[in-house]
Amino acid sequence: MINRGPVPLTPPVTVGPQTCATLSGGGADREWLVTDGLGGYATGTVSGLRTRRYHALLVVADPRTGVRHAGLASLDLTVTLPSGATVALHTHEWASGAVAPQGHRHLETFTLADGLPRWRWRVGDVVVERELAYAHGSPSLAVVHRVVAAPGPVGLSVAALCTWRDAHSTRRASGPAPVTRQVAGGVVVEDAYRLAGPGWQPTGEWYLDAFARAEAARGHDAVEDLWLAGRFTARLGAGAAMEISAWAGDLAVQPPPAATVVAAARERAHRLVAAAKPVDDLAAQLVLAADAFVVTGPDVVAAYPWSGSHAGDTMAAYEGLFLCTGRAGEGRELLTAAVTGQAPEPGPWRSAASPDAPLWLVHAVDRHVARTGDTDLAAALLRPLGRLLRASLDGTGPLTVDPADQLVRLAPGTPRTGKPVEINALWVNALGAMAALSEEAGRDGGRLRTRHRVAAAAFTDKFAAPDGWLHDVVEGPPAPYPLGAGATHDDPTLRPSQLLAWSLPHAPLAGTHAGGVRAAGAALLTPMGLRTLAPGEYGYQGAHAGPPGERDIAYHQGTVWPWLIGPYADACRATGLPTEGLLAGLEAHVREWGVGSISESADGDAPHRATGSPFSARAVAEVLRVRGYAA
C-alpha cells in the first residue's frame, strides 16, 4: 500500500476513464495547473494531450521582468510489461491530423488531491501512476512515477521533449536546435534548466509538427517542433518509484528528491487549508485554487496560463485571495508596497488600460482594515493613499474629477470615454472608504463624508435610466445615430458594470432601487456568472470564439464573466433580493474545465462553454468571498 501522508483536508477531485480516455469533450478539454509561487507553472490536460503552446511541465518566470519561458514540454511515458510488450502511455496530436500514440486510452483515473495532479494508467494487471509538484518558491519541478501493481518487474522509459522559448511563441526546427550539455544523471538545456533522473540516455532529435488544437481554434500559431533530449529509464517492481527532477535557477545545486518535494507540497496544502478555516469542502478546494495566484512579492497573477500581474484585477480579487484565506499578513505587505510607491514608475495606478486600479486599491485597503481591525495600517497608509488617489485624478492620466458634479470622467481616447457607471461607483465608494479610513486612524473624516454624500447624490441624479436601471456611460461621445442627437450621449444599455453601484460597501445606491438589480438578474444572469450584454441588445454575441479580433469584441458583447457573480450577489444582498443557489453552476464548474478552479469567461449562450483563461484569480476570489451567504 502506498503511503501518501496525512488524510487530505480537501476531498480529491477524480475523473474516470470515460472522460480521461476521450479527447474532444473529455480529458483534452479539462486542464490542470501547478505553480511555483514565483509566476512559473506546469499545466496541461487531464488526458495528457498538449492542446496549447502554454502546456508544459516547466514554465519559468524571469525574476526581474516576470517574462515566462517554456522549457520542458512533456515527459512521455512508455511501459514495458513483464511479457516484453511495450505500451505508450503518452498522447500527441500532429499537424497531419493524426493522434499518435494514444496513451490516454489507458488512463484509468485523473485525480487532483491537495492541489496536486495524479494520473493512473492501467494496462491489464499493470498499474502505473504519475504525480508531480513544484517546490514552492523555487522553479523546481518534481515528478514521481510509481508502479502500483504488476505481476513482475516492468520497465519505464520517460522521454524528455524540450524547448526553450517565450511562453507565448513556438519554436521550429528551421532554427537552431536547443543547445544541450550532458551532466551527471541528466542534461542541461540552453544553460536555462536541468533535468535529472535514473538511467539517462541522451538522444538529440526533432519531433516535427506537434499540433495544439486550442491554439488553432483561437487563431494562433498551432504547430511547433520539440527536441527529444533523451530518456530516463528504470526497471521496477510493484511499489517502487522512479523520480525525475527539472529545475531552473542554480543548476549546480540539485533539489531534494522528487518524492520529498511532493510530500512537502501536500503538507503545505494542508497548512493553507487549515489556516483559512473554510466553511466546507468546496471552499477548501478554492483556497488551494487561490494560492496559485499569489506569488512572491507578494503579488498576484491575474490568470493562467498567459496573464501576468494586473493592478486592477489584483485589488478587485484582494479580499477573496487574502482575507478569505487567512493570508492577511501577506496582503498587508502587498497593500503597503502598492500604496507607498514601491511599484515602478509610472506604475500601474495611472494606466489608461486599467483606469479603475487606484479606486480598487482604496477599496482593498478599506476592506483589509474593516475585516482585520488593523487601525495601524489605516494610520500608516492614509496619507500616501490620499496622495496616490489625488495624483491619479489630476488630469495627467486617464481620470479627472468634473468640478461641476464631483463625478469622474475618463479622458477621450480611452475605451469608455465619458463618465462610466462602474468608475463612478468605485469613485463614490472610494470617498466613503477614505472617510472610514480617516476615522479608523483617529482623524476627522467629516469633509470626506460630505464629498461622499455630494458625489452619491450626483451619481443618483446622473445615472438613472428611463427603463429602471442605470446608464452604462453618461456624457459619452455623440451617438452615431440619429444624426444631430447632441454633443454627448447617455448610453442606457443594460450592462453588469452598474452592479457596483449597489455592491460596494460605500456604494451610492446601497439599499435602494432594487429594480436595477432585478433587471440585471433577469437579462444577464447565467449559471456561470453574468453576461456583459443582454441577448436582446444590438451587437450581442453569444459565442466567445474565433480569432483574437472576434474574441476581443465578443468579450464585452455578451461573454459571461464569472467574477461578476460577486458584485451581483452583494447587490442582491444590499437590496434584499434572494441569493440562495446563485453559485450552484460555478460550484459544479470547478470540476469541468480548469480542474479545481474557475475560468475567466464563458459563452453568453447556453450551455455557456468556458472560455478565456481556465484559471482566473478574480473568479476564484469572488466565489470564495461570497460563498458564506450565497451558496
Image (tube, rainbow, N blue to C red):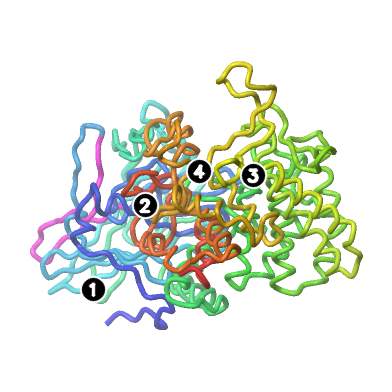
- Residue 84 found in image quarter: bottom left
In magenta segment, residue 87:
yes
- What residue did someone put label 1 on? 148
Classified by dominant secondary structure, the portion drawn in magenta counts as strand
Q: Is mark 3 on a helix, strand or loop?
A: loop
Residue 617 point in image, percent of width and height: 53, 55
Residue 45 point in image, percent of width and height: 33, 53
- What residue did someone put label 4 on? 69
Point out the image quarter for the C terminus: bottom left
- Which residue shows up at 36% across the image and 63% down it? 588
Number of other residues with Cα within 10 Å of mark 1, as a class: few under 14, some 14 to 19, many 20 or more:
many
Query: What is the magenta range?
Result: 75-94
Comparing marks 1 and 2, which lies closer to the viewer? Answer: 2
- Which residue shows up at 69% across the image and 65% down it? 367
Above or below residue 265? Residue 169 is above
Comparing marks 3 and 2, which lies closer to the viewer? Answer: 3
Give the tally of numbered discs.
4
Q: Closer to the N terminus: mark 4 or mark 2?
A: 2
Q: Which three-letter amino acid code belongs to the residue tagged 2?
A: Gly
Q: On the picture, is 311 further left or further right than 20?
A: right
Alpha-carbon distance for marks 1 and 2?
23 Å
- What residue did someone put label 2 on? 44
Query: Which of the pair 348/605 is nearer the observer?
Result: 605
Number of other residues with Cα within 10 Å of mark 4, as a class: few under 14, some 14 to 19, many 20 or more:
many
Number of other residues with Cα within 10 Å of mark 2, as a class: few under 14, some 14 to 19, many 20 or more:
many
- Residue 548 found in image quarter: top left
Q: Which three-letter amino acid code belongs to the residue tagged 4?
A: His
Q: Which three-letter amino acid code belongs to the residue tagged 3?
A: Ala
Q: Closer to the N terminus: mark 4 or mark 1?
A: 4
